[in-house]
Image (tube, rainbow, N blue to C red):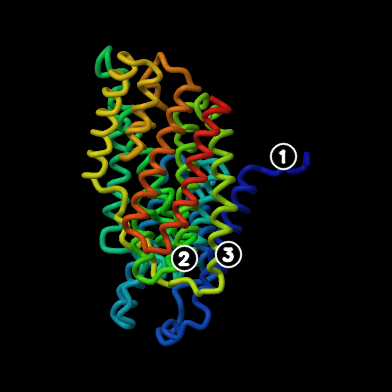
């Protein structure tokens, strides 16, 4: 490959400019082939030859005076003026306001300084991006149709939470007695909201018409408790108890996956301690869900989307409540541990299980109690999840149909019993 190094730099830059310009022009030809509107107008602005010549024109004017760019800027002004005249007639004759082809022509004109001044990968990335964005016009339009009224507002909220507020918060603990900093507190909100938001996006845009089982799996990444409540109510509206039980068990399995991901994000020592227990529990939910699903496989699944009532997880009110609970459980946990030690924390874990366990568990994951070992935190986490499964079973019994009750009792009893067996063996 020594001959490649001997190629003059200007020649190689010229070849890259010509090649990228030609590819863009070919894509434009393909994009406008068969366009009746273009045919009525007379001709498209330009395709392969035109865009290639625009790229070469920009290359010539750039290398004439690369120091002051006067020739390149003058050529850019002429190209822009010509494109403005074309655009004026395009609007006047075709009543078409589209400006994509004009913007692509200006990008093509700028390829020469881009290739000279930036790494090759940057030039290729921009060229490929132009090709892709032009080609996926219809796909982008169809995708945009799926966006609701507040989707971009929700995305903006998440960017504010993760990209603006989080970096500005101090890392120092608020006091010597409370070993949690504002940064850690907000980071927990961002982490939980991020996982919930991801499951929300997958459900809405990738699997909008998913059935009970897939909907339950995605809902479990958001909130297994909320999923259990919604599915239990669905059983009273004609949903099959077997399929709904399989969905509830699957959502509970995803609860363990979500908590393990959070443990990996905040404390790998705790994650390793949780791995055997969580792995056994997740593996157990698979045959359980399959068993209940097979019992009802002869009946068609209700097409109704069971989790449609889920609110987007990025409501500011929800984030504030979560932060308050995180701070509250942080204080309570420290008081209980100082007064009653590990046994007090285990009892507190069982009590907390009847509420939202994420703020409490994340406080433990972030080292809210420095004197408690990773093994004891893992034990407390398993106790809290077992207690949470108990309250979910109560919800399903109270809100579900008569045929659902026996099945969820059986499913949750196995998971709760296995949780305490794992605690006894491993912790």
Element at label 1: helix
Observer able to see residue 107 = no
| Coordinates of residue 204 in the picture (x, y in percent) | 40, 61
Q: Please indicate whether residue 18 sits to the left or right of residue 228 in the image.
A: right
Element at label 2: loop
Element at label 3: helix
Question: Where, by quadrant of the figure, is residue 96 drawn?
Answer: bottom left
Between circles 3 and 1, the one closer to the viewer is 3
Observer able to see residue 185 = yes
113 vs 69, nearest the viewer: 113
312 vs 159, nearest the viewer: 312
Eyeballing the image, is 236 above or below 20?
below
Q: Earlier in the sequence, mark 3 or mark 1?
A: 1
| Coordinates of residue 126 in the picture (x, y in percent) | 50, 52
Q: Please indicate whether residue 9 sits to the left or right of residue 91 in the image.
A: right
The CA span between labels 2 and 1 is 55 Å
Which residue is under mark 1? 5
Which residue is under mark 3? 294
Which residue is under mark 2? 210
At x 25%, y 28%, the residue is: 328
At x 58%, y 64%, the residue is: 294
| Coordinates of residue 309 in the picture (x, y in percent) | 31, 61
| Coordinates of residue 397 in the picture (x, y in percent) | 36, 55
Crowdedness of circle 1 by 10 Å Cα count: few (<14), some, many (20+)?
few
């Amino acid at each position: 490959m020594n001959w490649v190094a001997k190629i003059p730099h200007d020649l190689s830059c010229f070849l890259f400019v010509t090649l990228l310009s030609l590819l863009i022009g070919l894509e434009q030809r393909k994009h406008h082939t068969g366009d009746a509107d273009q045919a009525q107008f007379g001709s498209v602005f330009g395709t392969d030859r035109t865009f290639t010549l625009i790229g070469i024109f920009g290359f010539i004017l750039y290398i004439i005076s690369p120091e002051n760019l006067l020739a390149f800027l003058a050529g850019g002004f002429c190209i822009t003026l010509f494109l403005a005249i074309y655009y004026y007639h395009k609007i006047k004759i075709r009543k078409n306001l589209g400006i994509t082809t004009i913007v692509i022509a200006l990008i093509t004109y700028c390829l020469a300084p881009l290739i000279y001044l930036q790494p090759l990968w940057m030039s290729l990335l921009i060229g490929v991006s132009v090709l892709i964005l032009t080609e996926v016009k219809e796909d982008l339009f169809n995708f945009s149709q799926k966006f609701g009224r507040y989707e971009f507002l929700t995305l903006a909220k998440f960017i504010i939470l993760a990209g603006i507020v989080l970096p500005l918060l101090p890392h120092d603990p608020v006091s010597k007695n409370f070993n949690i900093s504002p940064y850690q507190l907000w980071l927990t909100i961002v982490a939980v909201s991020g996982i919930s938001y991801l499951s929300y996006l997958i459900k809405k845009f990738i699997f909008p018409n998913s059935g009970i089982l897939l909907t339950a799996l995605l809902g479990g990444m958001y909130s297994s408790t909320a999923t259990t409540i919604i599915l239990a109510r669905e059983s009273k509206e004609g949903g099959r108890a077997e399929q709904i039980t399989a969905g509830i068990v699957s959502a509970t399995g995803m609860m363990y996956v979500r908590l393990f991901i959070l443990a990996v994000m905040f404390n790998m020592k705790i994650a390793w301690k949780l791995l055997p227990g969580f792995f056994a529990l997740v593996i157990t939910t698979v045959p359980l869900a399959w068993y209940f699903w097979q019992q009802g496989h002869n009946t068609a699944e209700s097409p109704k989307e069971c989790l449609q009532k889920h609110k987007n997880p990025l409501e500011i009110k929800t984030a504030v409540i979560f932060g308050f609970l995180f701070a509250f459980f942080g204080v309570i946990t420290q008081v209980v541990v100082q007064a009653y030690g590990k046994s007090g924390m285990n009892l507190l874990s069982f009590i907390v299980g009847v509420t939202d366990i994420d703020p409490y568990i994340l406080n433990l994951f972030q080292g809210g109690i420095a004197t408690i070992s990773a093994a004891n935190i893992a034990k407390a986490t398993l106790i809290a999840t077992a207690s949470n499964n108990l309250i979910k079973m109560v919800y399903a019994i109270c809100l579900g149909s008569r045929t659902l009750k026996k099945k969820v009792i059986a499913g949750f009893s196995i998971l709760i019993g296995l949780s305490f067996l794992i605690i006894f063996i491993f912790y």
